[in-house]
Structure formats: structure tokens, C-alpha cells
Image (tube, rainbow, N blue to C red):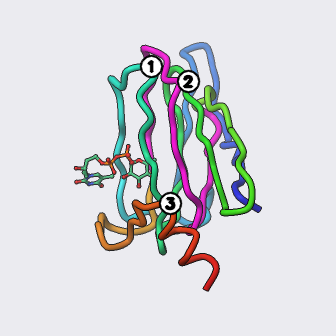
């Protein structure tokens, strides 16, 4: 499976909504890093890489965008527009993301610290590595 969509438990009341993500309870891995992305122009294509080891859960906390995922055999597009849902991507999946709404904020919860050596930034290299 190329990805999984995780529905987070949402606490909603008269004030609005709240999602809490706690280690060991709602998550497929221990979170070592959190980063977020905003202010991306609509037609910019970010990503264009795969990871050798990293697993991530990606949440569009505001607005929307499209993730294009590729396991070397097929491509699937996932539209993200729900802050109560996380896109879980394991390693060895090529990802691109685009079609950003003006208010799009993407929050990413990562299983590892930042490591440039974990990136495969060339598509041919990605295909070569996954066929080993
Ligand atoms: C991914 C998608 C969803 C850091 O210094 N630390 C970090 O933790 C990260 C993620 C990035 N950076 C630096 C590296 C670059 O100079 O921030 C700059 C932009 O990073 P990048 O071009 O890799 O950003 P995206 O949006 O293409 O990809 C990011 C993640 O890198 C990647 O793991 O899956 O978001």
C-alpha cells in the first residue's frame, strides 16, 4: 500500500475543534521532528523526492493541496483538505505536492531528524534503488 489516511480523534465542542496526537496512542511511530510549510504559490511543485528510511504523517491543517505519490509502479493523487486526517507515507515513495490553496498550511510529523542523506532527489536513482 502506497499510503494510509488516518482519521484522528477530534474533540469538538461549542468552542470549535481540537486534535491531540500523543506518542504511542494515535501514531504509527515516535515523532522526532515537526515542520510546517505555508505561503506556497498555487502551481509550485514541491517535494520531487523519496526517502530511504523516513516515515511521515502529513496534515493539511488549513486549506488544501494535492499529493502525488509514486511507488515506481503507479501514481496516485491524494487531495488533502481536512485537519482531522493524516496522510501516512512510509519510506521509498516518491512524492510531489502542488495545487496549493492560498491559505494552505501543511504540517508534517516525521519519524527521524532531518538528514539530507536520506533523500533520493533523482527519479531515475529512486527507480534504481527500489528495484534492488
Ligand atoms: C517531504 C515534504 C512533504 C530543513 O533544514 N529541515 C527540515 O526538517 C526540512 C524538512 C527541510 N529543511 C530545509 C532543506 C531545504 O533547504 O528546508 C528547505 C526546503 O526543504 P525541501 O525542499 O526538502 O522541502 P519540500 O517541501 O520539497 O519537502 C518537505 C520535506 O523535505 C520532505 O521530507 O516529504 O516536505
The residue sitting at 54% across, 15% down in the picture is: 15
Mark before the other along the chain sequence, 3 or 1:
1
Mark 2 and 3 residues: CB-CB less than 8 Å, in contact? no
Mark 3 is surrounded, within 10 Å at the Cα level, by few (under 14), some (14 to 19) or many (20 or more) other residues, namely some
**Left or right, residue 69 beside residue 100:** right
**Left or right, residue 33 beside residue 10:** left
- Picture quarter with the N terminus: bottom right
**Left or right, residue 24 beside residue 102:** right
Ligand 1 is within 8 Å of the C-beta of the residue at disc 2: no
Helix, strand or loop under label 1: loop
The residue sitting at 63% across, 49% down in the picture is: 69
- Residue under pointer 3: 123
Q: Bounds of the magenta span? A: 84-108
101 drawn magenta:
yes
- Residue under pointer 2: 64
Helix, strand or loop under label 3: helix
Quick one: which residue is furthest to the bottom in this view?
132
The residue sitting at 69% across, 48% down in the picture is: 6
Mark before the other along the chain sequence, 2 or 3:
2
- Residue under pointer 1: 42
The residue sitting at 61% across, 61% down in the picture is: 25
**Left or right, residue 96 beside residue 25:** left
Helix, strand or loop under label 2: loop
State which quadrant residue 86 falls in.
Answer: top right
Mark 2 is surrounded, within 10 Å at the Cα level, by few (under 14), some (14 to 19) or many (20 or more) other residues, namely many
> Residue 132: x and y, percent?
61, 86
Mark 1 is surrounded, within 10 Å at the Cα level, by few (under 14), some (14 to 19) or many (20 or more) other residues, namely few
> Residue 42: x and y, percent?
45, 19
Mark before the other along the chain sequence, 1 or 2:
1
- Relative to 10, is 40 above or below? above
Amino acid at each position: 500500500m502506497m499510503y494510509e489516511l488516518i482519521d484522528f480523534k477530534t474533540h469538538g465542542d461549542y468552542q470549535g475543534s481540537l486534535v491531540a496526537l500523543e506518542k504511542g496512542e494515535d501514531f504509527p511511530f515516535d515523532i522526532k521532528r515537526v515542520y510546517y510549510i505555508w505561503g506556497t504559490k498555487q502551481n509550485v511543485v514541491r517535494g520531487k523526492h523519496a526517502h530511504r528510511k523516513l516515515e511521515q504523517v502529513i496534515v493539511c491543517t488549513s486549506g488544501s493541496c494535492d499529493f502525488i505519490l509514486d511507488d515506481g509502479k503507479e501514481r496516485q493523487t491524494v487531495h488533502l483538505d481536512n485537519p482531522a486526517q493524516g496522510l501516512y507515507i512510509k519510506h521509498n515513495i516518491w512524492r510531489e505536492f502542488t495545487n496549493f490553496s492560498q491559505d494552505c498550511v501543511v504540517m508534517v510529523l516525521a519519524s527521524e531528524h532531518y538528514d539530507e542523506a536520506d533523500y533520493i532527489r533523482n527519479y531515475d536513482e529512486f527507480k534504481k534503488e527500489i528495484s534492488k
